[in-house]
Amino acid sequence: MENLTLKTLNEADLQGKTVLVRVDHNVVKKGKIEDPYRIDSTFATICRIYAKGGKPILMTHVGRPKDKKTGEITMEEKTSVMPVVKYLEKKLSLRIKVPEFKAEDAFGYKSLCKEVMDPLLGELKSGKIDMIYLPNTRWFAGEEAKDEKAEKLADEMAAIADVFVNDAFGSWQSHTSTVRVAKRLPAFAGILMEKEIENLKRIYEPARPFLAAVAGSKFDTKIEPLSALLEKADHLVLGGVIYNAYLCAKYGVKIAGVEEEDVAAAKKFVDFSANFPGKIVELPYIVESDTMDGKFEGQYRTVSLKDLKPGMELKFVLDAAPETFADPAVAEIFANAKTFFVNAVMGFTPNFGSGTAAMYSLIDKNKDAGKLYGGGDTLQDFKKLLPGTYMAALDNAKYYMFTGGGAVLKAIEEKTPAGMEPVKMLLK
């Protein structure tokens, strides 16, 4: 990894200035915070801004409130920032206000209305409140737009602040709140952003053997990073629908719920993987279920890959069976690894978590290896399935928890963090 020189908070003059901070507090599911790790990870940046005399305005996206087909934006409690605001108020004893705007139609907020913002900015500057937290950035029509709506929102965001700080490593997409606004204000990397980029070195220059485990629901969106990982890693483990599509492509079987385009993408990957014999660690035992509604006695079974025949039709494959990770060949590969990168929930949770728990336990047994975990879902399931191991991992120097798994995959695909547009904006 080439040396990137970021503009950091240490060199920013924040005294008496309004600081617009993009964070990745996308941790709200159905109106509740499942795991505050990503919020807690930004405390260092928030506290440093206060220590340097800055007045923070925070913003994050929550969920996917925009309908990609119609462009309509649904503003409701389950994608509101309010649970995050309440958590911050309690944890850091802050007085925070969230501006309330009016939506003229079903396509989100049109602007950061001055009539609403100016009085709040006055309260922030005079010390009556400690922080402004903007509504979900994806509630604004200009956030994901590519036209004049995006330019207008960027101008309005720049108008409410003197300085921009990006602490949202996990938000790697080129949106208005991550890229456009950074072109209009002095822009700096937050402390978390610095830390995440620093830890990417452990993936770009890993201690070997390097084992990567990646799962997901769509093969076509993962084919580029998976191909880059196959070149980079010594071993690659696949999970979830990605692994199902791989099995369909390689063994000529059909698995319920796996779409044709995923199998087509997996076929290309299987052909590409022929250049790297032995790198893909095939999980020898999978769990087939008659239903996705739950794990019901008599309605699921363990299937061995050895028994797969072309043309065979399987029902839903919802997990890697735990005995996979007791298999001597698999266990040996995990025991010998010196670096792990894990962005993988192996099964269809919450009912099919045994394979994930078995894999995380096997990784934890390898005390010497560096363990890099990434992604909100991965961390949430780690915490739910193995709470004791997870809590110990947070204080263990051998572990590092990235706040964004997709962002790490993007950085791997680009072969440098500088290939990510939001990071590019923060370079000297």
Image (cartoon, rainbow, N blue to C red):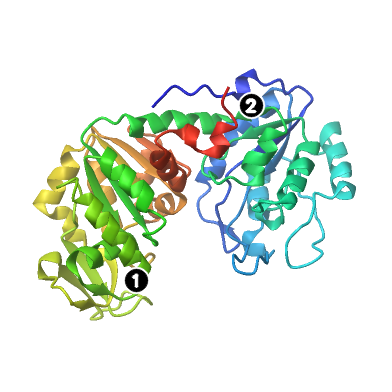
Seen at 87% across and 46% down, the residue is 114
Q: Secondary structure at mark 2?
A: helix
Identified by mark 1, the residue type is Glu
Quarter occupied by residue 351: bottom left
Residue of label 1: 260
| Disc number for residue 3 | none
State yes or no: discs 1 and 2 in contact (Cβ < 8 Å): no
Residue 321 horizontal side relative to residue 161, left or right = left
Seen at 46% across and 31% down, the residue is 197
Residue 180 horizontal side relative to residue 214, left or right = right
User: x, y percentage for residue 334?
Assistant: 19, 44
Q: Is residue 87 visible in the rendered structure shown here?
A: yes
User: x, y percentage for residue 366?
Assistant: 22, 39
Estimate how packed mark 1 is, as few (under 14), some (14 to 19) or many (20 or more) residues with alpha carbons within 10 Å: few
Query: Front-most of 36 and 314?
Result: 314
Query: Front-most of 403 and 221?
Result: 221
| Disc number for residue 48 | 2
Seen at 38% across and 29% down, the residue is 201
Estimate how packed mark 2 is, as few (under 14), some (14 to 19) or many (20 or more) residues with alpha carbons within 10 Å: some
Which quadrant would the N terminus be assigned to in this image?
Answer: top left
Residue 414 horizontal side relative to residue 149, left or right = left
Q: Is residue 358 visible in the rendered structure shown here?
A: no
Identified by mark 2, the residue type is Arg
User: x, y percentage for residue 303?
Assistant: 17, 70
- Counting residues from the N terminus, which is met first, the one under dot 1 or under dot 2? 2
Examine the rendered structure and indicate whether residue 240 appears above or below residue 363: below
Rounded to the nearest angstrom, the CA distance separating label 1 from label 2 is: 50 Å
Which quadrant would the C terminus be assigned to in this image?
Answer: top right
Residue 409 horizontal side relative to residue 162, left or right = left
Examine the rendered structure and indicate whether residue 292 appears above or below residue 273: below
